[in-house]
Image: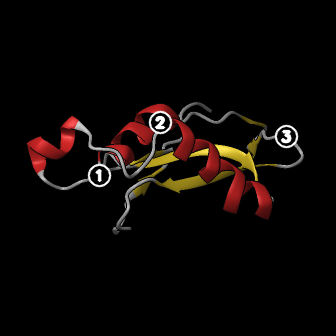
Amino acid sequence: VHVAGSTGAISTVEYEPGLVQHDIEEFLEKIIPYKKNYAHHKTWHDYNGAGHLRSFLIKTSQTFPFHNKKLILGTWQQIVFVENDEHPRKRRIFATVIGE
């Protein structure tokens, strides 16, 4: 699964409100804060350097296994899209199935 663009990301997580709406963002803000003056801002003047770094960390593509035509995930594990840009945009997400 791949998201086109360099500030969106694909991952897996237990989709629990406290984790998704608070804990993950708090963690990311500690290591890659939005309100920092990144060198990227000087180049493009779009002020989304944190979004690029967060997507670099989380990744824009992930591979997920299938067995007997069924997606293999943990009991609480779900595939999620992560918007890392400060200004949400239209996204294109692609899925490719390889194998039998």
Q: For the residues carrying marks 2 and 1, which lies nearer the camera in this image?
A: 1
Q: Do the residues labelled 2 and 1 touch (CB within 8 Å)?
A: no
Q: Residue at x 12, y 43 (%)?
A: 42
Q: Residue at x 18, y 56 (%)?
A: 46
* Number of residues whose C-alpha sits closer than 10 Å to that of mark 3, classed few (under 14), some (14–19) or many (20 or more): few
Determine the secondary structure under disc 3: loop
Q: Find disc 1 in the rendering and name its residue.
A: 48
Residue 9 image point, x, y percent:
47, 46
Precedes in sequence: disc 2 or disc 3: 2
Is residue 4 shown to the viewer in this render?
yes
Residue 98 image point, x, y percent:
53, 33
* Number of residues whose C-alpha sits closer than 10 Å to that of mark 2, classed few (under 14), some (14–19) or many (20 or more): some
Residue 27 image point, x, y percent:
63, 43
Q: Which amino acid does label 1 sit on?
A: Asn
Q: For the residues carrying marks 1 and 3, which lies nearer the camera in this image?
A: 1
Q: Which amino acid does label 3 sit on?
A: Gly
Q: Find disc 2 in the rendering and name its residue.
A: 59
* Number of residues whose C-alpha sits closer than 10 Å to that of mark 1, classed few (under 14), some (14–19) or many (20 or more): many
